[in-house]
Image (spheres, rainbow, N blue to C red):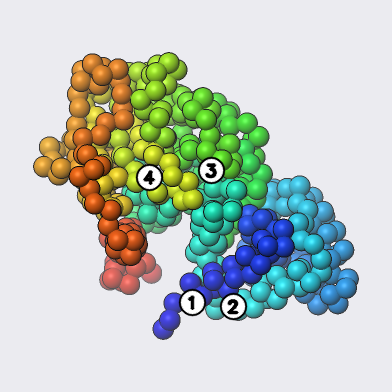
């Protein structure tokens, strides 16, 4: 059977370039699609009683000439829904469409989704977020690469019942992946412990898209929003967290953030961890070698936490931006435990995340990491770091010695690595995976 997932995502995205040419930005196109998609599928979902399904269904049936004004009023009314999650998707909603013909075109696309395709909507929506994010004209960065998200989640191993946060939630990809990971074993599936997911986001467009992304992934609670809109990034307003995963490169919602804002959020993150709380945070290279406040915060991080791993990322990972970035892995611990920091260079590994996961090991705290002969894996003592001014931008592989691989080779290796990660997530741990049917419990 042919997987309908790529076809569905392609069908939903096909009109986007034409809408962009007509003055509808890619994130705005995705927002309009989001609102119509929610109106279309609501009657099949657990939140149907809180959503005015019948009112929205009239939109599909009425003449084109009357549709546009009706849609404008629908968006206005939907902002006042009693359910905070649903109302959050419509916060300050107003259409960017120009006429009824554009609205009709989107309605026809949304109405072409059949019941059999509903199970693919969540993954298709993730693909739409990637498409809207990676387009050179997008003006918004919405989601980190899936392989990167899955790798950081696998490394930190979030557990059912823990408090999981992202102070720069974007499309909520870290929260969703972490929540899915907590359901991967028999024991956790039987657990009654409630995982607490909470994200903050300063950009309203990304908040709406994040809430829809959560809804499609069955993260829904009629009293508590998984992602809150806070116009100024402020982690200090969040409760203590057991696990924090975040991409700080785009704290301001669209363009890459300046170092001062990133430093402020990073500082709040390590203060916000519970005892033995753990974090994986993406920051720019410049933050790891800059002087002044950056150096002081690095010193504080090294002294107050166990910063055990620094992952050097490929520069083209956040297309269309070329951003040299790295991931800091740390947890709250006594300073004497922070005797060694391991560095892994993925920048010259052609995005082989699977090798990094293997090198990282099974311990999310990296307390018993063995010495490795992998040339992309080095360590420095706390004394060595202090001698070089706590510089964490450590590079020992010469870029000139590396040849740029053919583009298609890179794409094939990236796809292969992503498939390996999915296999690791689902085949090894998930009792619902076909390979583990004998472990299923009735």
Give left or right: position of 145 versus 89: left
- At which x and y percent is residue 270? 42, 27
User: Which residue is under mark 4?
Assistant: 315
Quadrant housing the N terminus? bottom left
Q: Is mark 2 on a helix, strand or loop?
A: helix
**Are the residues at dot 1 and dot 4 in contact (C-beta closer than 8 Å)?**
no
**In this view, 274 is above or below 206:** above
User: Is residue 182 in view from this perspective?
Assistant: no
Q: Which residue is drawn at 66% across and 74% down?
A: 109
Sequence-wise first label, 2 or 1: 1
Identity of the residue furthest to the front in this view: 400
User: In the image, which disc is placed on residue 346?
Assistant: none
- At which x and y percent is residue 38? 67, 63
**Are the residues at dot 2 and dot 4 in contact (C-beta closer than 8 Å)?**
no
**Whole-Å distance between the Cαs marked 2 and 4?**
41 Å
Q: Which residue is drawn at 76% across and 56% down?
A: 96
Q: Which residue is drawn at 35% across and 18% down?
A: 299
Sequence-wise first label, 1 or 4: 1
Sequence-wise first label, 3 or 1: 1
Q: How crowded is mark 3: few (under 14 residues within 10 Å), some or many (20 or more)?
A: many
Between circles 2 and 1, the one closer to the viewer is 1
Sequence-wise first label, 4 or 3: 3
Q: What element carries label 1?
A: loop
Between circles 4 and 3, the one closer to the viewer is 4
Q: What element carries label 3?
A: loop
Q: How crowded is mark 4: few (under 14 residues within 10 Å), some or many (20 or more)?
A: some
**Whole-Å distance between the Cαs marked 1 and 4?**
32 Å
User: In the image, which disc is placed on residue 115?
Assistant: 2
* Pick the front one: 117 or 254: 254
User: Which residue is under mark 1?
Assistant: 4
Find residue 278 and report its image quarter: top left
User: In the image, which disc is placed on residue 169?
Assistant: 3
């Amino acid at each position: 059977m042919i997987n309908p997932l790529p076809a569905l995502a392609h069908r939903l995205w096909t009109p986007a370039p034409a809408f962009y040419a007509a003055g509808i930005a890619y994130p705005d196109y995705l927002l309009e699609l989001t609102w119509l998609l929610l109106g279309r599928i609501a009657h099949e979902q657990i939140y149907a009683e809180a959503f005015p399904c019948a009112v929205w269904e009239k939109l599909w049936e009425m003449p084109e000439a009357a549709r546009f004004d009706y849609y404008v009023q629908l968006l206005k009314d939907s902002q006042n829904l009693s359910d905070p999650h649903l109302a959050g998707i419509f916060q300050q909603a107003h259409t960017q469409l120009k006429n009824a013909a554009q609205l009709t075109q989107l309605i026809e696309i949304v109405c072409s989704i059949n019941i059999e395709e509903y199970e693919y909507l969540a993954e298709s929506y993730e693909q739409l977020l990637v498409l809207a994010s990676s387009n050179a004209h997008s003006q918004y960065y919405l989601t980190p690469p899936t392989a990167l998200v899955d790798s950081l989640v696998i490394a930190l191993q979030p557990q059912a019942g823990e408090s999981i946060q992202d102070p720069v939630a974007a499309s909520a990809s870290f929260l969703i992946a972490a929540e899915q990971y907590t359901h991967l074993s028999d024991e956790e599936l039987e657990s009654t412990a409630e995982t607490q997911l909470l994200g903050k986001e300063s950009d309203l467009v990304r908040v709406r898209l994040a809430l829809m992304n959560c809804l499609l992934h069955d993260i829904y609670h009629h009293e508590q929003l998984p992602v809150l809109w806070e116009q100024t990034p402020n982690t200090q307003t969040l409760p203590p967290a057991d696990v924090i995963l975040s991409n700080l490169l785009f704290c301001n919602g669209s363009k890459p953030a300046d170092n001062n804002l990133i430093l402020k959020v990073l500082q709040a993150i390590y203060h916000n961890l519970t005892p033995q709380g753990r974090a994986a945070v993406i920051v720019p290279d410049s933050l790891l070698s800059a002087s002044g406040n950056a150096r002081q915060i690095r010193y504080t991080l090294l002294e107050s936490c166990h910063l055990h791993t620094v992952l050097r990322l490929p520069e083209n990972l956040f297309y269309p931006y070329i951003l040299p970035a790295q991931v800091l892995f740390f947890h709250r611990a006594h300073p004497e435990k922070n005797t060694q920091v391991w560095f892994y260079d993925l920048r010259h590994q052609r995005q082989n995340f699977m090798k990094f996961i293997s090198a990282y090991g099974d311990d999310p705290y990296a307390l018993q990491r063995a010495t490795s002969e992998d040339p992309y894996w080095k360590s420095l003592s706390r004394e060595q770091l202090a001698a070089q001014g706590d510089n964490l931008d450590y590079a020992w592989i010469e870029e000139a010695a590396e040849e740029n691989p053919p583009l298609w080779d890179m794409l094939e290796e990236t796809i292969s690595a992503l498939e390996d990660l999915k296999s690791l997530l689902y085949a090894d741990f998930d009792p619902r995976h076909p390979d583990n049917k004998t472990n299923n419990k009735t």
